[in-house]
Image (cartoon, rainbow, N blue to C red):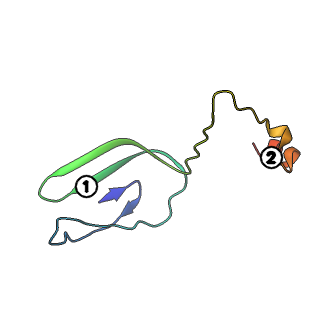
Amino acid sequence: MSLASLQAAASVAADSTWHIRLGALKAGGPHQLTIEGDGRVAIEDVLNGEVWIGSGQSNMQWTVSFSDSASAEIAAA
């Protein structure tokens, strides 16, 4: 298996599962993820990094200016 500049190998368990742990990779992309075994699968345009999910009711409002350390949050955005 390879992703960007990282490569790793794994063995398939009796229950057909496998696990690979990769080292750190800087956020970015797009990369290609390639998995090889009896066949070869290549997945293009893979991005990596943090994923933030925000949700709430459609009538919910809370502006950043009401947050703790608002000026620091705004400056870091």
The local secondary structure at tag 2 comes to: helix
Mark 1: which amino acid?
A: Ile
Nearer to the camera, 36 or 62: 62
- Depth check: give the residue in front, 52 or 36: 52
- Residue at image location 41% in from the left, 58% down from the top: 5
Residue bearing the label numbered 1: 35
Density class for disc 1 (Cα within 10 Å; few <14, some 14-19, many ≥20) is: some
SS of the residue at dot 1? strand
Per the image, the residue denoted by label 2 is 73
Alpha carbons under labels 2 and 1: distance apart: 40 Å
Q: Position of residue 18 (x, y in %)?
A: 25, 66
Q: Amino acid at mark 2?
A: Glu
Q: Nearer the viewer, mark 2 or mark 1?
A: 2
**In which image quadrant can residue 8 be found?**
bottom left
Q: Residue furthest top?
A: 59
Report the side of 66 relative to 51 (left or right). Answer: right
Q: Residue at x 26, y 70 (%)?
A: 10
Image quarter of the N terminus: bottom left
> Does the residue at mark 2 contact the one at mark 1 (Cβ under 8 Å)?
no
Q: Residue drawn at (88%, 44%), measured in percent from left and top? A: 71
Residue 7: image location, x then y, percent = 35, 64
74 over 37 or under it: above or below:
above
Determine which quarter of the picture holds residue 60: top right
Specify the quadrant that holds the C terminus: top right
Disc 2 packing (10 Å; few <14; some 14–19; many ≥20): few
Left or right of 9 on screen, residue 75: right
Which one is nearer the viewer's eye here, 74 or 15? 15
